[in-house]
Image (tube, coloured by chain):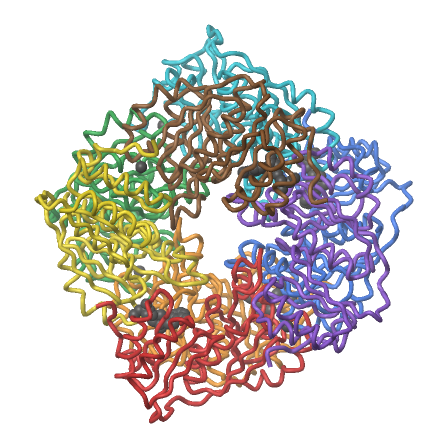
Chain colours: A blue, B purple, C cyan, D red, E orange, F green, G brown, H yellow
Amino acid sequence: GYATLDLQREARTGFPEVIYGEGKTSEQIFGIFNKLMEHHDKVLATRVSMDKANYVLEKLHIKYPNQTFYYHEAASTLHWINSTFQEKWKKGYIAVVCAGTSDLPVAEEAAITAELMGNKVERIYDIGVAGIHRLLNKARLIEDANVVIVVAGMEGALASVVGGLVSKPVIAVPTSVGYGASMNGIAALLAMLSSCASGVSVVNIDNGFGAGYFAATLTNT
Amino acid sequence: GYATLDLQREARTGFPEVIYGEGKTSEQIFGIFNKLMEHHDKVLATRVSMDKANYVLEKLHIKYPNQTFYYHEAASTLHWINSTFQEKWKKGYIAVVCAGTSDLPVAEEAAITAELMGNKVERIYDIGVAGIHRLLNKARLIEDANVVIVVAGMEGALASVVGGLVSKPVIAVPTSVGYGASMNGIAALLAMLSSCASGVSVVNIDNGFGAGYFAATLTNT
Amino acid sequence: GYATLDLQREARTGFPEVIYGEGKTSEQIFGIFNKLMEHHDKVLATRVSMDKANYVLEKLHIKYPNQTFYYHEAASTLHWINSTFQEKWKKGYIAVVCAGTSDLPVAEEAAITAELMGNKVERIYDIGVAGIHRLLNKARLIEDANVVIVVAGMEGALASVVGGLVSKPVIAVPTSVGYGASMNGIAALLAMLSSCASGVSVVNIDNGFGAGYFAATLTNT
Amino acid sequence: GYATLDLQREARTGFPEVIYGEGKTSEQIFGIFNKLMEHHDKVLATRVSMDKANYVLEKLHIKYPNQTFYYHEAASTLHWINSTFQEKWKKGYIAVVCAGTSDLPVAEEAAITAELMGNKVERIYDIGVAGIHRLLNKARLIEDANVVIVVAGMEGALASVVGGLVSKPVIAVPTSVGYGASMNGIAALLAMLSSCASGVSVVNIDNGFGAGYFAATLTNT
Amino acid sequence: GYATLDLQREARTGFPEVIYGEGKTSEQIFGIFNKLMEHHDKVLATRVSMDKANYVLEKLHIKYPNQTFYYHEAASTLHWINSTFQEKWKKGYIAVVCAGTSDLPVAEEAAITAELMGNKVERIYDIGVAGIHRLLNKARLIEDANVVIVVAGMEGALASVVGGLVSKPVIAVPTSVGYGASMNGIAALLAMLSSCASGVSVVNIDNGFGAGYFAATLTNT
Amino acid sequence: GYATLDLQREARTGFPEVIYGEGKTSEQIFGIFNKLMEHHDKVLATRVSMDKANYVLEKLHIKYPNQTFYYHEAASTLHWINSTFQEKWKKGYIAVVCAGTSDLPVAEEAAITAELMGNKVERIYDIGVAGIHRLLNKARLIEDANVVIVVAGMEGALASVVGGLVSKPVIAVPTSVGYGASMNGIAALLAMLSSCASGVSVVNIDNGFGAGYFAATLTNT
Amino acid sequence: GYATLDLQREARTGFPEVIYGEGKTSEQIFGIFNKLMEHHDKVLATRVSMDKANYVLEKLHIKYPNQTFYYHEAASTLHWINSTFQEKWKKGYIAVVCAGTSDLPVAEEAAITAELMGNKVERIYDIGVAGIHRLLNKARLIEDANVVIVVAGMEGALASVVGGLVSKPVIAVPTSVGYGASMNGIAALLAMLSSCASGVSVVNIDNGFGAGYFAATLTNT
Amino acid sequence: GYATLDLQREARTGFPEVIYGEGKTSEQIFGIFNKLMEHHDKVLATRVSMDKANYVLEKLHIKYPNQTFYYHEAASTLHWINSTFQEKWKKGYIAVVCAGTSDLPVAEEAAITAELMGNKVERIYDIGVAGIHRLLNKARLIEDANVVIVVAGMEGALASVVGGLVSKPVIAVPTSVGYGASMNGIAALLAMLSSCASGVSVVNIDNGFGAGYFAATLTNT
Ligand SMILES: Nc1ncnc2c1ncn2[C@@H]1O[C@H](COP(=O)(O)O)[C@@H](O)[C@H]1O
Ligand SMILES: Nc1ncnc2c1ncn2[C@@H]1O[C@H](COP(=O)(O)O)[C@@H](O)[C@H]1O
Ligand SMILES: Nc1ncnc2c1ncn2[C@@H]1O[C@H](COP(=O)(O)O)[C@@H](O)[C@H]1O
Ligand SMILES: Nc1ncnc2c1ncn2[C@@H]1O[C@H](COP(=O)(O)O)[C@@H](O)[C@H]1O
Ligand SMILES: [Mg+2]
Ligand SMILES: [Mg+2]
Ligand SMILES: [Mg+2]
Ligand SMILES: [Mg+2]
Ligand SMILES: [Mg+2]
Ligand SMILES: [Mg+2]
Ligand SMILES: [Mg+2]
Ligand SMILES: [Mg+2]
């Protein structure tokens, strides 16, 4: 068949396999989503376009009329939590910070993933370094988190500045916001990897999901 | 002067400023090291060549005859802990895994940094994916850690495999080991950022220090 | 004219010229396909979009009402085998392994090519390294093949792991599955070229055809 | 001959031709320096290694025993001002800010160039964003300048933060300080070009000379 | 909310926050534009597509029936100046030079930005180096400006030639005009950064806004 | 205005300014075409899409009912020769060779340009190195030309092989035909620049026009 | 310890672990070599510089006075075969073809590896495409092999031409021979991956070892 | 053996095989040089370091005491012309233009090659675009040549300006002169390929030899 599901992943890594929606047909997404529902209490699919989501949701609603499914348009995520589910993860407090309004979709993907994995998320949006005082005003709120996710495009400088301000681990997410020398996020990616602040680690460009997931494993350490 | 030390960094981020040895003269390294010793109980300098280390150590020994200084040749780190110092950080258990013998210098930089920040480190070296059973034999030992650092050059596949095996956060360090298409670590860097395993975040090429530091902030969360 | 067919290619290399569908008009594809049918018993065209395929198939059906033509939508291949044809190649057994469901189109292009060249193909799909046990379960099946094709996007780690597990030649096909640092397949390509496992060779990104063809020449050695 | 001096450059652009020392022999540098002295009151050569400088200085001292020549080791610049010279440029006040001690050679090249062109320079060194308060403490001093030069390697975030703090034009100079993903200054270069702060323009990696020169033309506008 | 406006930016840097239209919804652009109008006398949004502009303009016209809004189709800019506004900036004279007709959109973005910030702009278009006499004919007009903006795609040579002709600061804007080795503006960008003429600084590819803004800060020095 | 025509170009370089159609509006192309017709006997516009060509042709036909205009769809060129025109260039014989049918549009752009400049062109298409005998069969025909243009995508090997076979200058044109590691023509471009055959020079990716033009200047030497 | 030897590799993949000499100290190479000798009948170390080889050979000779060790200077390989050893691999006939004399070290690394693995190797050197007749003269000799290894730098065109001439699998090895646009082998690598000939697969730049190894697995299929 | 000389090359292409000195041992260079002398009247070796040249010259002088050999230190070329030789090529007049003194070695390699192939060469050095009048002063001298070679590093703008000034074919040679964004000649290479002037073709970075050779074939057309 087209899929060999990794049904032991939750046992090994603490969370079931997540569906990567890009490059899959609507039928394949539905098929895998459905199969995962039979073995887990939570299912998450990322990078699901509106069109595919409509198709999948329709078939899911028919098959599971008593369950609720969530599609977030900005974040392009589709997920389900079993109504009977009791959270087992240790609740952490995660700050999701982003530099500009244009970074919002990636920040939301991170926030939704972290919440789905049982964490409390504080969204602190549009506080990029061009107006550093916006960040300094929020420094306390950020320091209070267990982990900080910093989402930024263009030059991605926000990650370094936050990294130098707080004692908590900072997970940097470069975004593809920008043009020309931003090179679809490469500038921010290289900048974040080269950060002069210690305690910053990085995930892939636009990978809000990866940052949210990594943050959740941290709070569970 | 040539330096404006950030003496409040420990108060803000939990650890004093760390000296980046490359591009500094021996005299500058000594000057900054000496100054930091006056305000802190630990001082770390990274990327200090043997030549520079010899110069700096000589001047430090003369000035502080009763203190011990450590230079690690493979890792190129130079550090000092005040004999009177009592560890304040929460002790964590960190696994440092590397793919091949050639990755050892970077792995050691990570291990030394994590230890200096008060953690217990388990070194698990030379278990790259070309012989996957070497890794599977150590899976338990790795899962028991609070955080896992994976150091690998060439294609850097070890990070993905470890990421899929354990529930703990994995910090991947690409190394510049390899040639040709390895592009001085770019291949491993891109691969680690593109990992199909969730829960993997990445630091700069050969940045063992950054991985060790980040891991330490995690165990302190 | 627009084409100078290489009608001696089969005599030299064992297989007739294959049509590269991209950048050709439907009319050109039909013209070349038709011409090749006059000199050979098999014709293969790759990278033929649905639209072009429809046009070409219609004209072929009119001209050759008694022949069967095959179009594979996922793989975008169009081919024909003369009903009167007797296979001359030595039959080999080729394993086509892929990492994720999203890699399926490339894997199918490889499988169809290898089959058309007279081989038996075993499809082993969606066993990427994020769940390594899926691969270990299939290790025997893979070792039994004469040649192994490994198709993977993102970080492409599957090629190294398979390469370290079996004694058979491994042909790695990076795919453009992934985003950001995957750089449309460059990450997987560089990783596969830098593999720490010996006995791995690589073809172009998304070049399922090339892998299938190369594997077929191997079984004919 | 090996050189066609542009003796009208001062008339056109306000400053005589500057000698680019790299890729020239000591003999050629001396020859051009000597020739330019015959037509101008100031001569500057950049990127002159210690070895070449020694050779050139020796020959210059013999030929012009009554003149003073300046070689700056960190900046690798060699220059001469005629003792009889009266400054014609409008005096400006230029702040040269750098992120770390390792950026000093580039910052000095900028400062020396700007001074040679008749400006007053304030050096504000080692105030990178990992300790943002060092910068905030100097904000006033920086705002008071006519033009600000920001020199930074690694991720180059300092340029954006300064750009967002002051109303004066900011000229950003990326340096090759860093390793791995810093890519010899490419990371800082792309970041500075992608700055979310307005009013930032950029010169080549390690091009302190270009920044100092450009700043001087500004103060002359 | 989705935006944290930096309302002090005008006080700090001399001009209010500018809206980056890409990656924002029409609703978000309207919301931010509207908010900024409440605190400032000028509002500028860049990279606003025709579609988004129509939506935003409609809502602005309803809300502010007595105000005039300007949308420039080629430059994709949308702006507003309060009818009651009195210019406070020192008027400068800025020459905007471009190499070819295809560079016009970027040149216009620069010109509009500089005008909005209170400057007089001279547009000198389509005088690229393939016909150098077109440029030499305008040399006087260009030298008379306080600052020169040079907009060029393909190989971007115009910046170097202008830089060598005049004594005024030259701000180079590479454009994405060209194909193949032009690499969407990278060729021009690298060329401008590597200019053999002194006194040239560079902004991002297609960043007419940034050049106009930077030039305006210069005339205000 | 939007254009500063270089009406002396023909006097200087032997051929009037050629219109680059990309990034210009239909109206601009018409305007410039019209203007050039007033001063020259030939006008050429390249990279003119079908849509723009229709608009321009309609307006030209109305204005010049007695003149003939040529639009080549594959090559996307639009040109005009005055019916009263007498060729002044020395007639040369130029061979245009291409590797595959997919390279035809670029080869045609070269051929049309060379013909318009007064040369006799021999088209030798689809003789790529995968079937080297096709090329060897044509070696004589190629050697007889004054200049050879070689158009090839993918790995561009044809240029080296032709370069090693003939004594005539070879102008290599890399095309964007291919995928993955072909990188839109970069692979062929780098390969042609690195050719082990002497006597090969290179123009931009897909730049059939440039090759045709350059070849024409050669025959006029 | 610094090494975790994979002693089962021979059982799994048919050949013992090979030592990668770069980035290892002489002491480490000796240690691993020695250990591998205790478990296998053949040991191979690649990328061993002359200096390291001298150190290792001296210690090996002392420890194993009755054994013979081979160091190849051009190829930088060091190996040992037990005098008591009987070859178990199926003997294949492998042609190693190279384009120029400068590619010899890489070709030798391939040839030595293939021989060590029990194959007969025919060396056909310096027959690059600039003089295609050299290759055509050897076509028969090449076709007779079971597998062909093509080693070429610069534009790497030889791989495509050989691929189009023979029916046997072609393993292409790009080398770092060349300068400028050759980009240390990247041009040849991309070209070989983009080959218009079918049946070509590629290994890393300068990876003669990998090609020899892969070829040996083929003859064992 | 290590070399398969292409002794028919002169018959086919008009000039004997040229020795590429890099990556060859002194012994190999001598061996090939010697062999070529037996079949030709001219031998050229490029990229021969001083050390290798001394070795080769010594052995050549011993073997051929009555012949003259020329080594050019700046150009790193070594050549020989038989004293009995009569030039057969049509004499052309070639202008070699370079931008700066640092480009001299590459310009000399071009000039020597063109002279060796029977042409008259005019050297016009150090007339880069930063002082455009230097070029305009030489325009006539350049236009009078049959072919123009333009050698330039940094941004390589000189090629475009010359291309727009003259009617003769322009061969552009990018050099690796520059730093940072010059990227070892990549900036100049891309710029020259993207030239807005028609009639410019390009050879590899620092490939003076290739330009000289190509120019010579042109004058022989
Ligand atoms: N065309 C443009 N190019 C670069 N930066 C811009 C442009 N337009 C606006 N900006 C800046 O982008 C930032 C807006 O970020 P955001 O919060 O996403 O709106 C502000 O600091 C602006 O000054
Ligand atoms: N020249 C080479 N190129 C690529 N891989 C190699 C080479 N020589 C040895 N290897 C592989 O590199 C790995 C050794 O890694 P290490 O543990 O660092 O010695 C082994 O899996 C070898 O098969
Ligand atoms: N947005 C995402 N970014 C990166 N990886 C993802 C994302 N969503 C899911 N994944 C991972 O992608 C893999 C799915 O591959 P596939 O078998 O093609 O579905 C799983 O291992 C997921 O954990
Ligand atoms: N450090 C530098 N960086 C960039 N350009 C420079 C530098 N020093 C001198 N130049 C310029 O380089 C050109 C010198 O080229 P050349 O003829 O080779 O000496 C002059 O136009 C100088 O203005
Ligand atoms: Mg904002
Ligand atoms: Mg090992
Ligand atoms: Mg899957
Ligand atoms: Mg510092
Ligand atoms: Mg124009
Ligand atoms: Mg064809
Ligand atoms: Mg040779
Ligand atoms: Mg000069």
Q: Nearer the viewer, residue C200 or A6?
A: C200
Q: Position of residue D127 (x, y in %)?
A: 63, 75
State left or right for residue A142 relative to residue F40: right
Q: Nearer the viewer, residue G217 or A93?
A: G217
The residue at the point 58 percent across, 56 percent down is D181
Q: Position of residue F130 (x, y in %)?
A: 37, 27
The residue at the point 40 percent across, 64 percent down is E194
State left or right for residue D73 relative to residue G4: left
Q: Quadrant of residue H35?
A: top left
Q: Quadrant of residue A97?
A: bottom right
Q: Nearer the viewer, residue B140 or B169?
A: B140
Q: Position of residue C93 (x, y in %)?
A: 59, 16
Q: Nearer the viewer, residue F166 or F79?
A: F166
C75 to A85, vertically: above or below: above
- Is there any visible trace of residue B13 in the rendered image? yes
B108 to G53, vertically: above or below: below
Q: Position of residue D56 (x, y in %)?
A: 34, 76
State left or right for residue F141 relative to residue B178: left
- Is there any visible trace of residue F67 in the rendered image? no
E152 to H33, vertically: above or below: below
Q: Quadrant of ligand 5?
A: bottom right
